Image: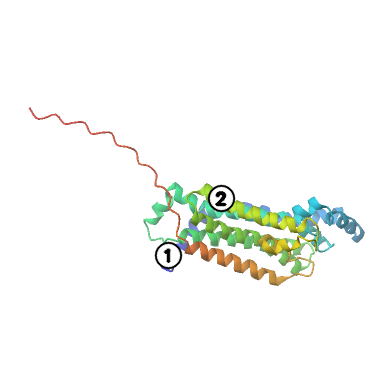
Amino acid sequence: MTTALVGTGGMIRLILRRDRILLPLWVLIVAVLPANFVATFEGLYPTAADRLGYAGTSGTNPTFLAMYGPLYDTGIGGLVTQRSGFIPIALGLISALVVIRHTRVEEEAGRRELLGSTVVGRQAALAAALLVTCAANLAVAVLITATTAAQGQPFAGSLALGLQMAAGGVVFAAVAGVTAQLSESAGTARGLAFAALGGAFVLRMAADTGGEGNSLSWLGWLSPLGWAQRLRPFGDERWWLLVPVAVLTLALAAAACACRPAATSPPASCPRAPARPRRPPG
């Protein structure tokens, strides 16, 4: 395994150099959304009575519950948490694309073979892609924690909110690592990763549509998105739910590293023109 990971540091630097604009951009865009929601809700619902009226709608509307999930607290932090319910899904999608871009896409383009001629282990590219993507998601969590707490929200709830958002990203980065190893093309790897993300979202959506305690709420425990959502930032946080998220992420990453990479077809070489017959001497 040590030999397979040789050159991981160099691959990390390569990814950071190639994504020096795109990576910070999506981290910052996603991270500022909850802070923007705090300011919006403070302006629209300044009193507890206003927030209770909003909760009466958002807590019972099936469409709203399916998209954003249940409301666990009627404070500003609770409203922000519910409205941010789509962010783990978005981070899962972005993370899957980033991992596949730096693994299977690189192999299809032939750049992985060029790097393979140097001192780079067989799993260095995968390990680097996973480490960079998970670090980016943790950076999102740190920024969300800092910006939300800076606006007067409790630190514990702000931290739980940041980790809830990042959970979807790290899990589906690992999922994409597995699909990239098992698939022969980037398109297939993306399709499998998106199918896994869609399945997790459907389970979470079915569990939440009828509100908390409905007959299908148990389906949420089958989805990593459901685990993250049940962390309940600002509403009696369940920190222990970070354990299954971390265990699943590590298990998927280990499975991806253990899988034999699917071979890609080498690019066809240009056919040579037939040799012209040589004229006999004389």
Can residue 36 be seen at all in this image of the molecule?
Answer: no
Left or right of 130 on screen, residue 155: right
The numbered mark at residue 190 is 2
Give whichever of 102, 221 is nearer the camera: 221
The numbered mark at residue 4 is 1
Left or right of 37 on screen, residue 1: left
Residue 13: percent from left, percent from top = 49, 58
Residue 34: percent from left, percent from top = 74, 57
Q: CA distance from mark 1 to mark 2?
A: 24 Å
Residue drawn at x 29%, y 36% is: 272
Instruction: Name the quadrant of the N terminus.
Output: bottom left
**Residue farthest toward the left in the current orientation of the protein:** 282
The numbered mark at residue 246 is none
Choose the circle earlier in sequence order: 1 or 2.
1
The kind of secondary structure element at disc 2 is helix
Residue 24: percent from left, percent from top = 61, 54
